[in-house]
């Protein structure tokens, strides 16, 4: 991992900053609400605009990159993030920030669609070293995002936005200078391909499970900071601990559970525990320490579920990996985008308890949907254990999952090819 071309380090650095965006705004949500005289439901639209645009853009990223190439797609995504992050920092209203976060989501979709493929294509030392580099960047970004957001947010709520703009501008210059032009894909991807892929029951089942899981996940991210009543710095440390656990268990815990119990049983367990933690937050919203403990603990099961869900998509999808990832990303990001919006409406009409309870019910609903696909997941596990052939080029073309890759599936493909 430490003997790579400079271009790989440039893209990996951009990956770190991109993944920081997941939790970067969490520590400043209360400050935004107070200083911009906005309700929590209005502030939650920062997640909604970002994720809904990312969801729709997922349908187009394959079409774009197959026509202009990976490098130009990567640079376009980085450029959009720089511009819209800076504009969000300059904005003086919550509506302006929400709008600029939408542009940020478009840039992020273009970037994450090609970052893994570029790292794999440019890395030295084999396929395994490239994947380790990517996973290291992912984990560092997820963990560091809330901490950086908290530290900069303690100075000003504008700090995290300007921080991302500066760091991404550095990554943009480094990538443009150091990265060689990437070859265009052998064939062009249709815009309708991801939507057509959802006609397959296996892919649709996992995607709908992910929608309901993301409903709970982004309800927690969007509203848990309020009942904690902490400063931006302290909130940053809380979500830093959450991010560390999420990154660690996505890379280590999920593969172990999959090998020990299988994909479906492991997902049942992770989703159920996550639902219980959401329910506890909903029941004990007034207890600051109860909320903190449940949020930090959720990093364990969220990391496990993120990896297992992505792996499940790649195992059962009967279409090409880029198309499967685009379809899956489109559906699941819709759930993540709508959840904060409706959670805000619930708070306005009832109280802060309700969104977390509804989130817990949604996640349990995801378990119910997943049970309808138990047989196909068990069959996919059996094929993997039996040594199903793999093609690393297909994995390299996968649209990187923003919240975690599929390390076990990737490792299996690498080993199968080596044999």
Image: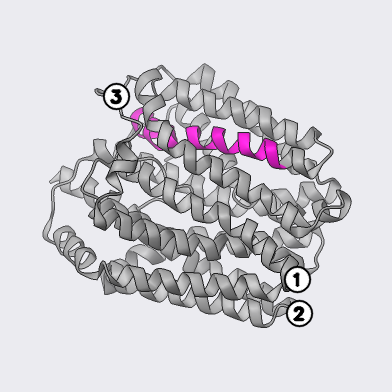
Asked if 275 appears above or below 95 in the picture, the reply is: below
Say few, some or many: other residues with alpha carbon within 10 Å of mark 1 (under 14 / 14 to 19 / 20 or more). some
Asked if 38 appears above or below 163 in the picture, the reply is: below
Asked if 335 appears above or below 2 in the picture, the reply is: below
User: In the picture, residue 349 is in which quadrant?
Assistant: bottom right
Query: Quick one: label 1 or label 3, which is nearer the N terminus?
Result: 3
Query: Quick one: label 1 or label 2, which is nearer the N terminus?
Result: 1
Q: Secondary structure at mark 3?
A: loop
**Residue under label 1:** 227
Q: Quadrant of the N terminus?
A: top left
Say few, some or many: other residues with alpha carbon within 10 Å of mark 3 (under 14 / 14 to 19 / 20 or more). few
Q: Which residues are magenta?
A: 98-122
**Residue under label 2:** 286
Which secondary structure dominates the residues rendered in magenta? helix
Q: Residue at x 29, y 67 (%)?
A: 263
Q: Nearer the viewer, residue 242 or 328?
A: 328
Judged left or right of residue 196, residue 171 is right
**Residue under label 3:** 188
Q: Are marks 2 and 3 in contact (CB under 8 Å)?
A: no
Q: Secondary structure at mark 1?
A: helix
Was residue 416 drawn as part of the magenta stretch in this picture?
no
Q: Nearer the viewer, residue 267 or 248?
A: 267
CA distance for labels 1 and 2 = 6 Å
Scheme of image coloration: one colour
Q: Are marks 1 and 2 in contact (CB under 8 Å)?
A: yes
Q: Residue at x 49, y 65 (%)?
A: 302
Q: Position of residue 31 (x, y in %)?
A: 82, 54
User: In the picture, residue 208 is in which quadrant?
Assistant: bottom left
CA distance for labels 2 and 3 = 53 Å
Was residue 111 drawn as part of the magenta stretch in this picture?
yes
């Amino acid at each position: 991992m430490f003997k790579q071309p400079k271009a790989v380090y440039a893209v990996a650095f951009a990956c770190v900053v991109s993944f920081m965006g997941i939790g970067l705004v969490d520590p400043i949500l209360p400050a935004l609400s107070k200083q911009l005289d906005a309700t929590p439901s209005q502030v939650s639209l920062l997640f909604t605009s970002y994720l809904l645009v990312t969801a729709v853009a997922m349908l187009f990223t394959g079409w774009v990159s197959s026509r202009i190439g990976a490098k130009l797609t990567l640079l376009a995504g980085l450029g959009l993030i720089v511009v819209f992050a800076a504009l969000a920092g300059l904005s003086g209203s919550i509506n302006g920030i929400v709008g600029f976060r939408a542009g940020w989501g478009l840039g992020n979709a273009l970037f994450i669609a090609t970052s893994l493929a570029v790292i794999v294509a440019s890395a030295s030392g084999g396929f395994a070293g490239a994947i380790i580099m990517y996973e290291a960047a992912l984990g560092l970004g997820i963990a560091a995002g809330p901490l950086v957001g908290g530290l900069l947010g303690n100075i000003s709520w504008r700090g995290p936005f300007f921080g991302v703009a500066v760091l991404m501008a550095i990554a943009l210059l480094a990538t443009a200078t150091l990265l060689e032009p990437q070859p265009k894909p052998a064939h062009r991807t249709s815009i309708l391909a991801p939507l057509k892929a959802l006609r397959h029951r296996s892919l649709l089942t996992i995607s709908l499970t992910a929608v309901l899981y993301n409903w709970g996940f982004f309800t927690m991210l969007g509203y848990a900071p309020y009942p904690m009543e902490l400063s931006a710095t302290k909130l940053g440390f809380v979500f830093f601990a959450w991010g560390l656990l999420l990154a660690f268990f996505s890379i280590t815990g999920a593969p172990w559970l999959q090998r020990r119990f299988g994909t479906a049983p492991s997902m049942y367990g992770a989703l159920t525990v996550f639902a219980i933690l959401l329910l506890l937050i909903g029941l004990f919203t007034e207890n600051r320490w109860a909320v903190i403990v449940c949020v930090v603990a959720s990093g364990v099961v969220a990391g496990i579920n993120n990896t297992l869900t992505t792996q499940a998509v790649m195992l059962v999808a009967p279409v090409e990996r880029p198309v499967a990832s685009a379809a899956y990303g489109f559906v699941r990001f819709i759930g993540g985008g709508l959840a904060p919006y409706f959670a805000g409406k619930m708070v306005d009409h009832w109280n802060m308890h309700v969104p977390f309870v509804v989130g817990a019910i949604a996640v349990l609903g995801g378990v119910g949907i997943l049970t309808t696909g138990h047989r196909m997941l068990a069959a996919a596990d059996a094929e993997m254990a039996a040594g199903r052939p793999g093609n690393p080029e297909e994995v390299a073309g996968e649209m990187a999952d923003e919240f975690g890759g599929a390390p076990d599936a990737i490792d299996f493909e690498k080993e199968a090819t080596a044999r």
